[in-house]
Structures are given as C-alpha cells and as structure tokens.
C-alpha cells in the first residue's frame, strides 16, 4: 500500500460540505485516496512535514488551450480583441506539429502543477491537414509524464471562411473525420470510473467556426458514448452579432436548438447571457467555465459571476489559453477573479473563499466529478501545500480560505500531490528533466514562430 501523511499542517482548508478549516491537523492518503483527516499522526510510508503550511485541495482547471503556449507574449497581437486576434494567430497555428503539441503541453501543464493545479482540461481544436492525427494522444503523454489528471477534449472546426466562418479553410475538417476521431479518442482514453486520470469530452470550437450539423452530430455521439460536451459561448459581442446575422438566433438559443443544454454540457466564458438565459442554464444544469484574465486581456467583458452563483448555475474557474492569459497559473487566476468582481459588483462580489471554491469544488462539478476538488475521507488524494511562515505573509494568515483572493500567493507551492503521488516539490517538477525539456521547448517554439512569420 502506498501512503503519504501530511503532518502537523498549520491549517487544512478542506472545502468540504461543511467548509471546515482544520488547524494543527494531519491528513493521510492511502493508494491515492484520503483515508483520514484529524489530530492523530498516522503511520505512512512517507511523511511530509507541513509545519508552517496551509494545505488546500488540488486546483481544477476547466478550460485551456495548451497549444497556444508558444504564441504568448507576441507583440504583434497584444492590442487585439478576440476576432482579429484569432484571425492573426490562425496563420501561425497552421504550423503546429507533434513536437509543438508535446512541449507546449509540458510547459503549460508544468506551470499549472507548480502552482497547485492537479486536474487540467484542455480544448484543442486546431488540426492542420498534415501530421495532426495524434495531437490529443501526445497531450495525454505529456500529462502522464507530469502526473496530472487530464481531461482532453476533441475540439474541431468545420466552418471555414468560404462558408462564412472565421478560420481559414485549410484548418477546418469534414464532419465525418471529426466524429470518427472523436470516437477513437473516447474509446482509447476515456475512463468513466472514480479517480480517473484520463477523461475525454467532445468540443466543437465555437458558433463562428463550426457548422450546425457538427454541433448536432457531436451531441448525439457524446451522449451515445456517455461523455461531456464543451464549447465557447457568449464570449464577445462580435460572437453575438455573428449568430444573429448568420444563424438568426442568439448564441444560447442556437446551442439549445442543437441539443446543447444539460448537466453534461459546459460553456467557456458566458459573459453575455441575459437574465432569462441564466435561468435556463440553472434549470438545465448547464455549466460555465469562468476565464477572468483572458476576458480582461482580450477586452471581452466581465462574466456575471454573482448572478450565476445566485441562480445556482454550476461555475468553475479556468486560465483559458496561454496566448490570451498569457500564463497557466490558476492560483493567480483566483486573485484576478476576486478583484475584477470586487471592482464590478462591490458588495455583491464573491469572497476570496467563494473563488477558491469555484477553482476546486465548482470546477470539479463542471467536469462532472465529485471525487476531486475537496479534502475529505473517500475523496482523491489531490492537494498542495503553501509555506505561509514567511515575511511576505505576515498579517495575512487570519483567513486561510480567503488568502489567495485577498492577498495572493506569488510563489510555487511547497508540495503538490496528485492521486497520492508527489508530482512537484519546492517548485520542481518531479516527472521530467526540467533543464532538458526547457531547452527543447525553447528550440521548438522558436522554430514554430519562424515558420509562422512571427520571428525573422
């Protein structure tokens, strides 16, 4: 039996059903599952000294585009909003290959892990016509190398410029090709059991890049295969205008007509929902992935999180793509979310602890899971420790649940555990040779940008 004891924690923020914060406590993980939390120091194969540390559930990221990691901080696109930003970057992304996918995934996932994230969902939807057949397989390999739980989505685009869509025609695929590969990936990787390390969802990209038949056929296939559905929705006013002009419906009405409502569906962004649409989301159990930094970076707007929460809509937190963030730090996303909603909603804004719950319990629910996102007996052994006995945090320790929202934490976690295994320690990723990976990733990135005309 593999076992780890987290011993003498200054505080354990459980995010459990009672929202307990346990002081001077211990936590035991056996075979990847939490079997004890309390005052006793149980025996274990490995003991992690948590004196001076706060312990939290592993963070859960509900929307990402890992392939975008190699196009972040590009000066050519820093002043663009979503549609022109996408149009410019499609010209670069058509040069993606398997090396780009592997090393961008290691880079983005590695940063997530370093800052306490133990589960990541990724939305990959760019498939060049040559050499992209194993992109999602390659992402799973990168996730396994790091030890993080991974929810891949088989994204897709089927509406190119010639059909009134946004992407270039050479980056869209026929519907039958998309559906065949979607089924292959589900059959190869999807694990529906509790504590799964791999899951798969189907994720046509957005109303402005896919056809109606793809949306309808994807919904039918997903439900036949018993997997979830995901797409971007209500992110910008441009998207709303596109749907009204080309499709004759508001975005959510259009998705509803394609069978895209239910507790097996979640949308990224959800900024421009109307009141009656929020009620429809709540009534149908449809979820939302909140991406505050990306929404600010692209000047898209502010999601109505207080209204979503008040109506009982399932909401999770996400970093979104590395090129619209421009990083993969879900811990930092908590503070950004807290502050943008304080600025926008004042006293009606969620607390720092509310945002932590979005990044843990809320995100787990959006992904259809109740085995992660909290520290309780019978739940997954996914957690991270942060050292709070330091000068930076003098006077900041009175409310461990709110710490990341109100004060923030700018260091990597002291220790990150996923499925009962230590995957990062003192900021070091244990599953890979970081210097070698960094060198290869930089070389791959520079070659990729040169091919895409972003570097001379």
Image (tube, grey):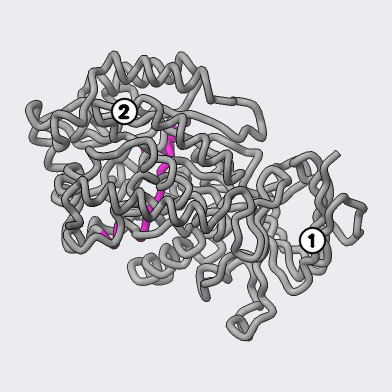
Counting other residues with Cα less than 10 Å from the Cα at mark 2, is it few (<14), some (14-19), or many (20 or more)? few
The quadrant in which residue 65 appears is top left
Residue 243 seen in the current view: no
Where residue 67 sits: x, y (%)?
35, 44
* Tag shown at residue 48: 1
The quadrant in which residue 276 appears is top left
Tell me the SS state at disc 1: strand
320 w.r.t. 172: above or below: below
Q: Which of the two discs, 1 and 2, sits closer to the camera?
A: 2
Tell me the SS state at disc 2: loop
Q: What residue is shown with label 2?
A: 131
Residue at the spot 65% in from the left edge and 81% down from the top edge: 390
Residue at the spot 71% in from the left edge and 47% down from the top edge: 421
* Tag shown at residue 308: none
Where residue 285 sits: x, y (%)?
46, 35
254 w.r.t. 328: above or below: above
The quadrant in which residue 74 appears is bottom left
Where residue 287 sits: x, y (%)?
43, 40
Q: Nearer the viewer, residue 270 or 428?
A: 428
Q: Nearer the viewer, residue 418 or 362?
A: 418
* Quadrant holding the N terminus: top right
| Magenta span contains residue 291 | yes
Residue at the spot 23% in from the left edge and 36% down from the top edge: 251
The magenta span reads 279-297
Residue at the spot 36% in from the left edge and 15% down from the top edge: 180
Q: Is residue 94 left or right of residue 112?
A: left
């Amino acid at each position: 039996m593999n076992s780890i004891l987290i011993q003498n924690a200054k505080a354990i923020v459980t995010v459990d059903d009672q929202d307990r914060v346990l002081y001077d406590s211990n936590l035991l993980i056996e075979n990847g599952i939490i079997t004890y939390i309390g005052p006793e120091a149980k025996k274990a194969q490995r003991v992690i000294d948590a004196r001076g540390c706060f312990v939290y559930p592993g963070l859960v990221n509900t929307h990402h585009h890992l392939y975008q990691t190699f196009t972040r901080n590009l000066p050519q696109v820093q002043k663009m909003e979503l549609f022109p930003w996408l149009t410019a970057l499609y010209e670069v992304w058509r040069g993606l290959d398997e090396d780009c996918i592997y090393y961008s995934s290691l880079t983005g996932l590695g940063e997530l892990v370093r800052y306490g994230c133990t589960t990541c969902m990724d939305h990959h939807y760019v498939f060049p016509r040559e050499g992209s057949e194993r992109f999602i397989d390659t992402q799973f390999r990168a996730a396994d190398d790091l030890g993080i739980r991974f929810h891949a989505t088989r994204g897709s685009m089927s509406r190119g410029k010639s059909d009134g869509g946004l992407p270039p025609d050479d980056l869209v695929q026929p519907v039958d090709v998309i559906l065949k590969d979607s089924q292959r990936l589900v059959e190869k990787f999807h694990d529906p059991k509790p504590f799964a390390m791999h899951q798969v969802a189907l994720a046509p990209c957005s109303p402005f890049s896919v056809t109606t038949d793809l949306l309808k056929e994807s919904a039918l296939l997903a439900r036949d295969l018993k997997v979830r559905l995901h797409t971007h929705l209500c992110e910008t006013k441009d998207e709303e205008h596109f749907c009204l002009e080309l499709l004759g419906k508001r975005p959510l009405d259009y998705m509803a007509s394609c069978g895209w409502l239910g507790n097996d569906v979640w949308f990224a962004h959800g900024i421009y929902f109307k009141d009656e649409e929020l009620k429809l989301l709540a009534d149908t159990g449809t979820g939302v992935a909140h991406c505050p930094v990306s929404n600010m970076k692209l000047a898209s707007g502010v999601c109505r999180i207080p209204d979503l929460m008040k109506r009982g809509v399932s909401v999770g937190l996400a970093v979104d793509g590395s090129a619209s963030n421009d990083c993969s730090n879900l811990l930092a996303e908590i503070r950004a979310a807290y502050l943008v909603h304080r600025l926008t909603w004042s006293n009606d804004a969620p607390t720092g602890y509310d945002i932590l719950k979005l990044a843990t319990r809320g995100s787990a629910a959006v992904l259809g899971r109740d085995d992660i996102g909290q520290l309780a007996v019978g739940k997954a052994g996914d957690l991270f420790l942060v050292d709070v006995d330091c000068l930076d945090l003098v006077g900041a320790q009175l409310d461990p649940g709110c710490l990341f929202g109100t004060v923030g934490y700018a260091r990597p976690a002291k220790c990150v555990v996923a499925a009962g295994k230590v995957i990062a320690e003192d900021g070091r990723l244990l599953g890979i040779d970081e210097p070698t990976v960094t060198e290869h990733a930089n070389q791959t990135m520079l070659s990729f940008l040169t091919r895409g005309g972003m570097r001379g």
